[in-house]
Each structure stands twice: as C-alpha cells, then as structure tokens.
Amino acid sequence: MDQLGNLLEGFSVALTPMNLVFLVIGAVLGTAVGVLPGLGSAMAVALLLPVTFSLDPTGAFIMFASIYFGGLFGDSTSGILLNTPGNSSAIATSFEGHRMAKDGRAAKALGTAAIGAFMGGMIATTLVVFFSPYLVRLATLFGPAEYFALAAFAFVAISAVVAESVVRGLIALGIGLALAMVGIDGQSGAARFTLGMPEFFDGISIIVVTVGLLAMGEVLHVASRIHREGSATRVTTQGSPYLNWREFKQALPAFLRGTSFGLPFGAIPVGGSEVPTFLAYGTEKKLAKRRGDTMFGGRGAIQGVAGPEAAGNATAGTAMGALLALGLPTSATAAMMLAAFQQYGMQPGPLLFERSADLVWPLLASLFVGLVILLIINLPFASVWAKLLLVPKHYLYAGVAVFSVFGVYAIASSMKDLWLLVAIGVLGFVMRRFAIPLAPVLIAAILGPLAETELRRALAVSEGDVGILVASPISVTLYAIMAIAILISIVQHLRHRRAAAL
Amino acid sequence: MKKTILTVAFAAVTAVLVLAATANASSAGGGATARSKLTLLAPAAPGGGWDGFARESQQALRANGIVNNARVINVPGAGGTIGLGQVAQMDGREDLLLATGAAMMGGIELSTADVSFDDVTLIARVADDYNVLVVPKDSPYETIDEFTAAWAADPGGTAIAGGSLGSIDHLLSGLLGREIGIDPAAVNYVAYAGGGEVLTSLLSNTASAGISSYNDFRDQIEAGSVRALGTSAAEPVEGIEVPTFIESGYDVEMSNWRGYAAPPGISEEARQELVDIVTEMHATPEWDDAMSRNRWSDSYATDGEFQDFIDTESLRVASIVEELGL
C-alpha cells in the first residue's frame, strides 16, 4: 500500500490553509466559467493559466485540479435550468434535467447533478490512484479496428434517443454528419465542403455546434413564443436540492451505471465525455421504459440526470489518469492540462511518479479535496441557481445569447465562428419548429468522424483487408453485443405490435 | 429577495464582462507600444506547440519586465495559416508578435489561401527541437538499417504513424522514404492528432513505426516502452543519445524550429524594437530554464540569417510536399 502512504502525504500538502484557499478559488472560478455557454474547463484552465504563474508549482497544480472538475460541475447548470447546455459534455444531462426544472424540481435536478458529478469523480480518482498502470493498458489494447467497433456500438446503443420518429431522426443524423464532414480530411488532405475558405479547414468546432443548436436555438425558440405563452408556464422553484432516502435509492444505481460507462472512456482517445454521457442517458431511458416509468421523458426522472452526470465526471477522472501515466490527452481539457504541466517542468509519462512525486501526490490528493469542496459549494447553491428562473424570460435569454457569443468568440477569436453560431442557431430554431430531435445531430457530429477516421486508419494499416475489422476479441465482442441488442429490440418490437393488434 | 437576486445577477454579469473584456482586448490594442503592451499571437489552440512556445516567452518577458504587459491570444487553424493570414492583414501594427515555425511551412504549402512568409515581417528564429523515429519495444527492428530494409521491401505494409498531414512528422517520413528509394507518395502514413495518440498506436501495435517530436517520446524511450532508431537533428544534440539520421548514413535532417514574425508595413524602428525584445527575452535565465525543460536547442538567428534560412527551407518543404502528393 505504497500509494496510500504517498497519498496521505499528498493530503498533508493539499490541506494546508493556503492551498485550501487556492482549491476554493479554483473551484469557484471553474464552476463560474463552466456555467457560461461555450466556456468549458479547457477554457477555464487556459484563461487562468497566467494567473497561476505567480504561484509555486504545488499551489498552481492544486488550483488546476479544482478548476478541472469545477468546469464539469458548472456546465450542466445552464442546461438544466434553461435547456442551454454550456458544453457538449452536459447535453445528455439537459434532456431530463430541464424536464425536471419545468416540473418545478430545478433545485433537485441541480443537486442530483452535483452528487452525480461528485460520485463519478470520486470513484474515478480512486481508481486512478491505485490502478493507473492497468488503466493505461486499456488504451494500448485499442487499435483503429477496435475504435471503429466501439463507435458502431455507440451509434446503436444511443439510437434510443433517436427512436421516436425514424424519418426525423435520420434527417437530424444527416445534418450532423454534414456538419462534421466540413474541413480538411485528416487522412487524405482533401478539403471537403470548405467553399475554398481556409477558415473552414479545421472544420466546425463541436462547441459552436452545441452552443448554436442548443443555446442560440433555444433563445430564438423562446423569443418566438414569449407573447403566446405569457406567464402561464411560470415555474415554481421551491424544493430542496438534497435527495431524500427514496430518491437516493432510485438514483444510486444510475450513478454507478453512469460511472462505469465513464471510467473506460477516460483512458482512450475518443473525444472526451460526450459518448459515455449519451450511452448513460440511453441506458437510463431504456431501463425506464422497461420499468414502465412515465416520469422519464415526461416530468423528468432523476435517473436521467444522475447517470450522464456521473459518467461525465468519471471520464474526466480517468482522463487525468491517462494524462499522468501516459502523457495521453484524451480530451481538450486534458490537452490544456498537459501544456500547463509541461510549463512547470512536469512531463507526464511513465517516469512521472518517480521524478515528480512531490507534485503528483499533492495533485491527486487535491483532486479528492477539490471534489469535496465542489460538492459543498454546489449543493447549497443549487437552490440559489434555481432562483435564476425567477428572472423574467426576456432578460434571462438575452443574457444567454450574449454569453453564448462571448463564449464562442473566446475559443478562437474568429468572426467566422460567430456567423456560424447565428446560422446554426437559426437551424436549431427551425428544427424545434418542425419537431426534429437535436440530439442525433450532436451524436452524428461526434461519432461520425470518429467512425470514419478509425475505419480508414484500420484499412490503411491492413492495406485494404476488411478482415482486420473482426480480427481481435474486443471488436468481435462489441459486434456480438450489438447484434444481440438489435435482435432483442426487434423481438420486443414485434411482441408490442402483436400485443397492440390483439 | 428579488432585489438580492438582481444584485447577485448584476455582480455576476459585471464580473464576467470584465473577464470577457480582458480576454478580448486584442482589438483595443491600438496606440500601445510593444514595450508597454505586447500581444503574442499563437496560431494554435491552447495546449498546442506554438501555444506552449508563446506562453514560455510570455513568462520570460513578464518575469524580467522586458515588456510591461505580455499576453497570449490563440488563433488556431489550418496549420497556423489562419493566424498568419490575420497578421498579414494587420498592416503597420507594431505591438504584436506571431509565433511561427516549421509546421507553418507545411501549412502554407497545403493552404489554398495565398499567404506566405513574404506577407509578414520576420523577426527571429529562437529555438529548435527535433523529431525522432521510434518502434515499439517488441518490434523486430533494432537498428535504423534493419527498419529501412524492411520498409523498402514492403512500403505498403509498413504503416508509419505521425502527426497531421503536412506536419514535420509527415514531411520527414517523405524525406526518409525518398532517401531509401521509396516514392514519398507510396509511404503508408497514418495521421494522428498528436504525439500521445501516435504513442498509443505504437503500443497497440497498429503502426510499425512512429515519428513525433523527441519531447513527446523522451520518457517513453527512457522507460523502454519504445525504441528510438534515429533523430532528425543535423548535428548530435547534447543530452540526446539517439544517433542522428546523418550519423547513420541517411542524408535526412529537419529541425522543428520556432520563432517570431511581426505584421507587415511596420517602421524600421518598430522592427528593431521587436528584435531587441526577443533578443532580451532570449538572454533571460527564465528562457534558459524553458529551453532545458523542453529540450529545445538554441538556434537564435535574426535579420539576414533568418531570412536566408526561411528562403531555402521554404523551397525544400515545397518540393517534398509536392512529392508527397498533397
């Protein structure tokens, strides 16, 4: 139990009064930046990096640790309250979260999200401390063929959120794939749908798509109906953010399921927490259907918030492990953290724990302390945030529009992104008007390029032999599970039909 | 109660506006001199190579008071040419430096936009690092000769992993291939997003070999998870024990240089002032420290020397990009 001793030593550094102050500052700033549309924890670290120059390395890392998780605590807040998720990691949480908010249970949804984020993060960080060498091995088991199988698997698993109308779902998928296709193709260098403009060479940022479609689209949608609905939809914001025992018992399995989705995804480079959060949402939705739970998709079910939120933070936790032990940044935030570490002369990789033990253990310890502080800050604040809904809509949504523009501009200081934001916002508005679901657009935009790139990499390595796709036990297992899942859903569908016919 | 909420909301809005205004003060920089307020434009996303270079510079400039206020803004995209294009438009702006380097040369060749180093004012080349060719630890190849023999025999079946198309990694794979008699266009190059992903492709035995910057692989080489066969340095670098390609008998060298350029149309005094700022930064202990931490080697050059280097290197990059069939 070498790790335990080292960790305790780390705690002794992290828990000095000065470092606790840094932790609290980082937690507050991280949460605040996370709440803003478009600004996630990557941006929070980037913006606050110069501030930490004046600190000693330990203090700086401790602050990074709480900023890192703080952004993830914050980003679901605006999604739950206003249906305008600040970042792609919070999209899945927003579906049920916003339904709960409309039902007058905003504080409860925020509380569930905070607890979910806490549990996911805690379990993942514990795993990282004790098992990071094994976790890292996961990344080395996955080649392009396995990633392709994983992407195909995720497509099928997530299709639950697409299922309501097949035609509308497919339209949305098509839009998502088209948006994702823009840019220089990474494998051949061919420019696709760039209209010859270099600004489009790197494609359309998923942040612009998320903020445009979900935040701007929602603003336009609300604006178009503001006089028709009047004050009839005035929501109540009473209620406690704390879960009672019955609710906790409902949410606990969802927390754990979400966490187990999130854990492996942090260790492999498939673009961060979007895929596991959607997988967690899809699973909760299916389970709710099987239970015959009418809250889910109606008034909003607590499990639909608990699962994705735990998955998101679990991913962030193990991503930190992959970053420290392998130097592999599996998300944008992790890439930013890597740069920050290097600036302090700490080179993540296999020798990190030997060379920089004096920095790594306090960092890991402060991840734990940071999560506790974030929970303490966020739970009581849930009711305060929920009061945001009392602000008249025309002020509130004007604010969302302003912050969306700020957030998107801050990513790349690019005017192009602002025009795109407006255009995609209008698209989101039109899609809402015609009841086309928005989630498939984002799923396609995230999974589509992943599936394409990995398929082509696999075929490049095998010189065009498609046999490589089923050459490993991991991919065969994934395809087998997928086939069984499809079979089961077909059988269920037929049974339903027969039952309906009778 | 309502009043409290409004106050809180107002305070939050104000705080965020201040934050956003700081982040976005780039357009408000008119009238400032380089000594009072210097903007370092990194044409890459936060966490990218140029971003790290610019932030190291920022730290050295700040700690020594060479400029009163130095800040970094990120304009990522298209191999750095989005940033280059923006700077090319800032005619006469004297308080801005563009971080630039070898990767931008590939970007310029690939870009359809008509920008190049001719559209900006060159200031200085500051530091270099080098690329390394590695194989997984259980690879059958112990030396560069064994690897190139196998590669030449089966170019299609030897997948080489590296960074994005047009990156130094990619150009180097073409130069090496050409040297051993493979058509650069026939090199089976698999592009990844960065050094970390190249590493996993090696550890999962997806690619036969990988090319990335020495820094990305340094610890992995030391820990024995990958084996280094050669580096792209022209001369052996102190502290790097891997033989250079030239030492092994392959006439291939390429440095991943980093440096600074300024907008076009600035006065001679302003240009000299920027050269002085970079020169002073280069002499600080913080910069020495940054170089040793990043294992950069000193390649400081300004004025005519830098210009000559850019001219010859641009031609060389253009020819290899063409042969790679991009």
Image (cartoon, coloured by chain):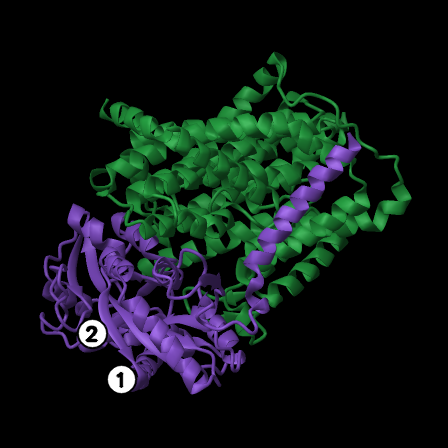
Chain colours: A green, B purple
Task: Give the residue number, with chain letter if any, for mark 2.
Answer: B253
Q: Which mark is residue B305?
A: 1
The image shows residue B130 at horizontal and vertical percentages of 23, 66
Element at badge 1? Answer: helix
Quadrant showing the C terminus of chain B:
bottom left
Residue at 22 percent across and 69 percent down: it is B298
First reached walking from the N terminus: tag 1 or tag 2: 2
The image shows residue B263 at horizontal and vertical percentages of 47, 79
Residue toward you, A303 or B139: A303
Could you tell me if residue A210 is visible in this image? yes
Quadrant showing the N terminus of chain B:
top right
Indicate the quadrant where residue A363 lies: top left
What amino acid is labelled 1 in the image? Glu
Residue toward you, A221 or A7: A7
Residue at 27 percent across and 78 percent down: it is B301
**In the figure, is residue A357 to the left or right of A43?**
left
The image shows residue A467 at horizontal and vertical percentages of 35, 52
**In the figure, is residue A272 to the left or right of B176?**
right
**In the figure, is residue B320 to the left or right of A223?**
left
